Image (tube, coloured by chain):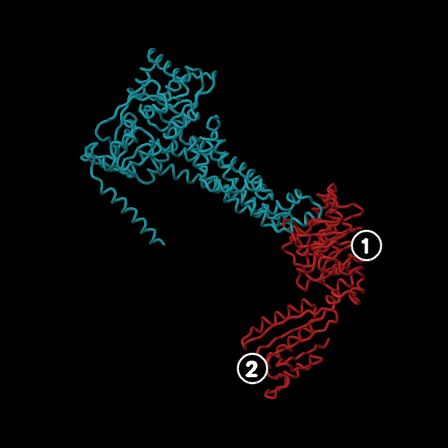
Chain colours: A red, B cyan
Amino acid sequence: MIKVENLSKKYGDLVVLKNISTEIKKGEVVSIIGPSGTGKSTFLRCLNLLDQPSGGSIFIDGENILDKRIDVSKIRQKMNMVFQSFNLFSHLSVLENLTLGPIKLKGISKEAAENKSMDLLRLVGLAEKAENYPDELSGGQKQRVAIARCLAMEPEIILFDEPTSALDPTMVSEVLSVIRRLAKEGMTMAIVTHEMAFARDVSNRVFYMDQGLIYEEGSPKQIFDAPKKERTKVFINRIRNFVSKIKTQDFDFYALNGEIEGFCEKQLISKLIRANLLRVVEELLILYKPYLNKIELELEIAHSEKTNQLSLICQTKGKKFNPLDNKDLEDDIGIKIIHKFTEVVEFKWADNQNRLELLFVN
Amino acid sequence: MIKIFLLIFYFLLSFQANANEAMKPIANLEDLKNKKIGVMLGSTHDAFAHKQYPEAEILQYKSPADVLLGVKSGKVDVGIYNSVSLTEILKLNPDLGVIDKPFEFSPVGFGFNKKDIELHAQFNAFFKAIKESGVYADMIERWTKKGITDMPKIDTPNKNGLLVAGHISDGGLPFVTLRNNENIGLNIELAKRFAAYLGKDIRFDDMEFGALIPSLNTGKIDFIAVTLMFTEERKQKINFGEPYYEIGMSAFALKKNIAAFKQEKKNNSNTPTFIEELVNNFQNNLIQEKRYLLLWDGLKTTIIISILATIFGTFLGGIVCFLRMSKNRFLNIPAKVYISILRGTPVLVILMIIFYVVFASVNINPIIVATIAFGMNCGAYAAEIFRSGIEGIEKGQMEAGIAMGFNKIKTFIYIILPQTIRRILPIYKGEIITLVKMTSIVGYIAVQDLTKASDIIRSRTFDAFFPLILIAILYFLISLILIQTLDYLEKITDPKYKRKVRTKS
């Protein structure tokens, strides 16, 4: 359906895409993953010529759309796009957002377009919002409307450009489940995403993009469980972490709590584990507090997306000091709590560096 | 707050009182040498005052009525004007008096373009004819001796085209004045007879005195139908027709400032009440001589110019905005230059340049000139308003339209434009209201708009307060109606308003 040959894109001297060649077949769901700034979105935007490629050719149903004689607007009607920032038309109601294209571009009667659009809104669960305006919807609702708006044009393929990146973590799943449903119904889709778990179970094929090219491609199983190439391995097994340095006794405890919660939400860590993590952090900080004017504490929370392992690392410099081993405490309730919520506790002292690592029960 | 106002008020009052106190009675023309003298800009009085009284402070006014009002309100101590008209004017203004006797007598005549020798010759032939037939003597008899102020019927067959005469409508009887919205006077009769002699129709363009000679020389008018005094300076610029009268100048002032009238007792025993005065003013300024017709015509002109200029300006603004936003340098640089020039020059100057320079030799309706000038000015501002509106819309809106399959133009029409309109309306509203108020300067190019109408009434009734307040109210009402209309437009373009209407019905 889409065939790309030697596609390249340059911004001045900066090469964003290097000779990409690939093919997307009808009914396929292709996920495009990879680090930021490696040209994933640019690749997608080149497919419908929102960004003009610098070289190569793109065939849609056998027609080269880079040919000057081709009416690109007509081709674009076959392949609609869902944007990271939704881009709903703010002057139109939800229903009008859906009917504008069919009425003005396809010449469908207003009534027919409205009936069809109401069906689509039901499909994405937003029929009751038909008369509302975009600024009255939540992020997740907006993105679902945007998907319905795409579908209203009856495209043969939908391009998703990071559809959940601008959403609150709580709203990600409602959008993903709509996309899942489309995948089940056999819609051809190309999805740029950072949601690994989602990419893994929704797609037939995964492109791992790095440094402007499709570095490795294969089935989700191949890419996620047995990546062959070096950089893919690093990316798939990478660990996301959160670091905070505490230098005084008067640090902003609530801001720190908020940041940790944000990190947990982003990593889709369950509520229970998040609560445990916060409790342990609080107890640890109470233990460290009397010494904080003299020493600097580095707090690190690390999460591996692949193994879903969560660990908390506390580091201080100076002579050997393990807060869990402190004999001067009035009671040991804090220490008991910490032990209750963590699986493994490891303490090391080397090169004047104290390192306390706690692994959470999963 | 109120205290501050009172303080300012008191200060102003005391200031005026001081000015009056410093005044010593004027006995003769010698006493003018260190006074404030009001004259009409570009008149022989102006030249005379500057030559004769180098130490005096000379204020140049744009019309005879302004000179008169200047004297009446104490802005100047003395005014100088032609002695014949002054006699008539003083009959209506008992608080003014003439100082000494008329002086500097000079013949007066119409003015002709130096290049238009034919018309000049025709006038002289015509004048010779009416002198011989006794028509001229009859005219002088009626207007200046008997004081009969009815215009005789003069047939002006429109066979050989149109003759455009420049004049000042508030010159004062017996030469010219405006009554029942119609020009009358010796000048008018003479000019009309001349047109009839040529078999032409005649149109009188009302101008400021200073604009008469430039207008003649740029071809805006065919001749000057004003009692022009013969001077050497003027003879270098224009040809004078045969002199038809001889007039001098008189200096005048408030009677209380003139030594000769000092002894006269005031008999202001029955000052009218406020209500009486208001009714009186209303009578004087509106009803008498059907002056409301003047205002009505002025109002229409103001509204027509405003509407046409708004339409033209919006249209032009759209084009300039398009050019300005173009990536092509050959398109966007001219647009930038246009915007900065139009925003950086007073609209009055632009108006005069278009009238006297650009369309110098074209006989064009001044209303069209006004529309072009105000439209050009409005267009420059509108272009920037449009641009900020369009640029304020996220790029994503355009991209979503394009990605859906709309071409650029359709995306603009269906997606960008409706959002832009909603965004810019509040600012645009202000721009249009500014435009309406700006039109008050079209009097400069001989258009009779609302402001000019009030000027004319002022020149007849010598009352500054009533006509000015009246047009202030009229302008305010125009703006108010405009604001209401645009507010409504703003409301109905609000998408949520549409829904409200839908759910109600």
Secondary structure under tag 1 reads loop
Residue B455 occupies quadrant: top left
Which residue is under mark 2? Answer: A290
Q: Is residue B100 left or right of residue B205?
A: left
Is residue A42 left or right of B492 when viewed as pictured? right
Q: What residue type is labelled 2?
A: Pro
Residue A96 percent across, percent down from the top left: 68, 48
Pointer 1: residues within 10 angstroms few (<14), some, or many (20+)?
some
Disc 1 and disc 2: Cα gap in Å?
A: 62 Å
* Residue B301 visible from this viewpoint: yes
Vertical placement of residue B222 versus B61, above or below: above
**Residue to which mark 1 is pinned:** A27
- The quarter of the picture where the C terminus of chain A appears is bottom right
The location of residue B282, given as percent across then percent down, is 37, 35
| Residue B457: x %, y % from top left | 37, 32
Q: Where is residue B183 in the image (x, y as percent from the top left)?
A: 39, 25
